[in-house]
Every structure is written in C-alpha cells, then in structure tokens.
Amino acid sequence: MVSTRSQKGQSTSNAANGKVSAPTKLATKSSKSNRHTPRKRVRVASSDAEAVEQPVDGDSPTEPGLRELLLSLPVELFGEICSFLDATELRCLSLADKTFWSVLVSDKSDPIWRQAFKRVVPPMPDCPEAMSSSDYAQLMLVKACTSGLKMKDWELTAAEWNTTEVKRVVKERKAFILSKLLDLGFGEADFPRYCYEVNLAKALDDEGWERIQPTVVSAAESSKISRLSTERWRRRNDRSRSLQVLWHEVVAIASGTRAVYAAEKSACSDFREFIRFAPVEALLEADTEDIPAQAIDSIRPDSLQFVIQGRRRYVVRLRNILDGLPPDHTNEEEWASLSHEETIAKLDVIAARLAKAVNGFWNPKQKRVDWYPSSHLSTPYVDLAVLSPVEELVPGLIIKMLESIDKDPDTESGAVAGSWWDRKMVGYRCARCDESVAPYLTFKEMISHFLEKKVWFDKASDAREKALAESPGSKDSHFHSILFNDHDWHSEGDIMVSDDSHEKARVRKLQNQLEAAYGNDPEDYNGEDFTTRSRRSAKQAPQRRTRRICRLCPEGFSPKPMYFATLKIHIEHTHCKAVNVEEDTAAFDPGWDVAPANPCIFEAPFARLYY
C-alpha cells in the first residue's frame, strides 16, 4: 500500500483532472484483525448532521466487506468510481460513512458533483456560483425542501419524463411480446393485453422472454378461445336475426285476416319452437357468417307449412274445449284437401269465434279467466287440458255482464277485457254490492267476483242443510235465518255498471265515510261515536281493534272478521234483517278458526284476511 504522505504531492494535479485530492489510503486495517468479533451492519445516516456524528467502527471483521474495500481504494480509483454515479446515488454514498462524508462535502469534490448533476434524468439546473455542490444537492434532492422555483419546475419535468419513459418501456415490451406471439401462430387479436407480465415497465430481452413465455402463451390461448367463442356467438346471432325476419313473414301470412292483432301472431307459433324445426335449425347451427338469400328462399314453403300447422293445432284444441270434445281430437279429412289459403281462411273463422267475450276459458291452476289469444293461453307451455269454458262454470254470467254495460253478445273480448298487457283497464263497479263496499274491478275480475259469491253461497247452503239434518229441533238463530244470494245474476236488474268520473267520485266519498266509521263498535267506549272525517285524523282517534263475525251464517262460513260497520251491511244484504249486535254478531278472537275450509275461490290464507 502507498502511504498517505507519498501521495500528498499529487493532489494538485489530480484536482485539475476532476479527481478528489484525498489520502491515498482512506482507512487501514485494524491491528486487532485476529479477533473473531461479530460483523456489524453499517447504518446509513438519515440527515447531514447525523452523518457527521456517525462513528467509525475501530474493529474490522476477519473478511473485509464492501465498505472496507471502498475505504482501502486509492484516490484515483475512488474518484473514478464516483464519476459513474448520479447526484442521488452520490448523496446516498456520502451519507453512508463519516469518511465518505468528509471527502464528498469538501470543495475539491465539486467536479464530481457537477458531473453527477448531469447524469440525473432529466438533468438538473446548473448549480449557483454562491452555493457549494453539496448544499445544492441538499436543496434539490431532499423531498422535505420545497423552496426554489427551479426545483419545482425540475420536479414537474422529472415526473413527466418518468411517465413518458414508463410508457415507452411498456410499449417496447408489448411490441417485443407481440412479435414473439406472432411467430408462435397467434393473431394480433389474441394479444393478452390484461396479463400482468405484459404491462410491466421493464425492458425485455430474449432471456426474459424465456422466463415469462409460459405465462404469456397461456394468457394468449385463453384470449384466443374467448375471441373465437365471441365470434361464433356473433355469427349465430346474425343468423338468428335473419331467421327471425323469415319467421315474422310467414307468421303474418299464416295469421290471415287476424294478422292485425299482435297477440294472434304470437298464437300462431313461438320463435323458440320455430328454430327447432329441422330445416331452420340446420341453417342456424351452420357456422357461417350469414345465411344466403337462396337458403332462406329454399326453406320458406316448409316454414309456412310448419307455422300453419302450429296455428291449426292450437286453434283446434281451443275449439274442442268449447265444444266439449277432447282437446287432442282432430279430423284430418277436414283439412287434408285444403290449400294453404283455404286453411288460413278456415282458421280465421274459428279464431273469430274464440275471440268473443262469451267464450272465455277458466284456468283452475292459475285461478283466472283468459280469452283467446291471451299470452297466458298462447304460450306453448300452457297445459290446455285443464281449461274449461267459463260458460259451463257460470252459465249466462258473461252475457248478463255485457247486457249491463250495453254491449253486444258477439263483442270480442279485447273491447271489454283489454289486451293482456293492459293491466290498468277501466274498472266496472259491482251493482249487486252496497255502494259503500262495492269494488271497482276489471271485466275478468268481475267474473271471478261473482264466481266467488256463487261458490260461497252454494257451500254455505249445503252446510246449513247438513246441520239441519243433524239437529232438526235446534232453535239456534243461524239455523232459521234467511240466506239470500244477492249476487244471483239470473235475477232482474244490472249486475255491473260503468261509472263516469262524477259517479266514481260520489261512490268513493261514500266508501271513505264508511272507512271513517270503522272504529264505532257498539261495545267499545260505551258506543261513543268516533267517526273520523279524514284518514289523517283517523290516526289520532282511539285505536280500536275489535272485529266481528256473523253468527247467522253456518259455522265456518262467516265472512272474514270485519268492523261492525261493514258486517252490518253483510247482514242486511245476505240475511235480510236489521242487526241485533248481541244475537247476530260476536267479537272475533284471533285464536278462533272461523273458516276451517276456506270457500274462497282464490284460496287465500285465512291469516291474510285481517289486513
């Protein structure tokens, strides 16, 4: 090793060449190197003051580390190493050791600092003449310092450069990966743009490609599978739209004169059924970009025949139900000799008969009335075998209803019942109910209303006859009271009315008055009148929960528990007498089961009848 004294004369020439003039040997090995002391970690100082105060270990381990090697380097070599560092790295080195700090903060280290400033990307502004290089590095590189306009501008420029540099590196990486994937047989559309390895901001070479190739190729294969599946779905969708146009054309022809009704078109055939037709399905499943016009024209006659047969099958089954025949009954001789035009014309005649309001169908599963061509009947998944004519269930009811609103018996259902999508059809009021409780219902709901009353009256009459047979000498009032069917549509008078706006307002006023009197029970509060004038003030009235049942009805057939004001109307209309509270009614106890066999046609749970 060359001593420090022998190198002192060369410091002036080295400073002129941009090298630090410092002792040749920055540190010497300890004389106690034969000790096997544990190796200590060198902690980098966090501030300039701490770096100055940081002690230097006097003991060295048996094997010299990086720090010891750097401290033992000659001046020329140490200065050459520092010339390759940028300003940030040089500052970190100066904070690592007291000896480094003393060398790098000296005035003679300015050439190294100025060269390091230029290595920063983007280059830092020039160091002011009145400031040392180490102080300038402190000003520009310490994040806590925010003074100086040049420093702020440089930070913005540096951030912008970093963003641009990252984008450039990622772009070059993606281009490199894409070229490799193209060589492997993938397309540009299969590029795995969302793969993690693809979007790293790190330059890539052939060695790095070998490392990430399995991951990227797997992602590209998944992207290719997804792309091919999407393209197949798109092509099938295009073919389906072409076949749907054909389906609309043949349905319009098969519907004949009834084609003006949108619901009747859906009654001819369902598109899901149409695409299962063999010639149509073959074109749909063929993996082609589109269906040629010649192929569409070639299956048009067969498609028309298929739709006509579907309409005939559906219409004839409904006709058989009206005529009392088995739904699947058919006479092929009736249709064999007919052309397409003649078949369509005959189906139009049958459809016009089915669409009349008097020819409704009762569905016992859904507890509803429907007419042809309602969507509830036209869907191919409806079990037509359970349908029955409404006329058999309530003979003469629909004709009586049409007469009450001045409609002809041949009126089609759409004129009174509304379309299947029109759920807000104008309501009719039941003329047999008291105006205070009369509901406003649609045409089909009115049929269900009268049907419910009929079922209740028939079952209640049978229950009374059975009770009389079992106890002929009983003197209970419900054995001898009158049981009158006030909803018998065979009696004289209208059974429903169509009110105008003024009449509706009058009826609503009566119903609001009845609702306001719900709290007036004879036994509550000594019969004091708590009739409220509005629904808002009803919330401030005493809370009355007393509901009553009718004792004049057969056991188990009393109407649902109700307030006395409403029960009074029931007794006057059904039992034709003035109300005696003690003899004719009883306060309802929720623990009772007053309707063990609920006769309601809609089979609503009894627990819901309170609300």
Image (tube, rainbow, N blue to C red):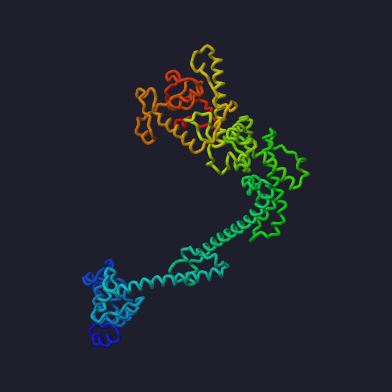
Point out residue 251 in the picture as x, y percentages from the top left corner: 67, 49
Tally the marks: 0
Vertical placement of residue 175 versus 378, above or below: below
In screen coordinates, is 33 left or right of 267?
A: left
| Quadrant location, the N terminus | bottom left
Q: Position of residue 506 (x, y in %)?
A: 46, 34
Give percent across and percent down for residue 280: 68, 53
Confirm whether residue 538 shows in the render.
Answer: yes
Query: Quick check: 107 above or below 141?
Result: below
Residue at the far top: name it: 473
The answer to whether residue 42 is seen in the rendering is no
Q: Residue furthest front?
A: 502
Q: Is residue 57 left or right of residue 227?
A: left
In the depicted view, which residue is nearer to us: 91 or 354?
354
Residue beneath the point at 35% across and 22% down:
526
Q: In which quadrant of the rendered view does residue 352 lie? A: top right
Image-quadrant location for residue 96: bottom left
Q: Residue at 68% of width from left, 60% of height from top?
A: 292
**Front residue (pair 589, 334):** 334
Q: Position of residue 286 (x, y in %)?
A: 66, 57
Viewport quadrant of the C terminus: top left
Q: Nearer the viewer, residue 371 or 318?
A: 371
Point 27% across, 85% down: residue: 15
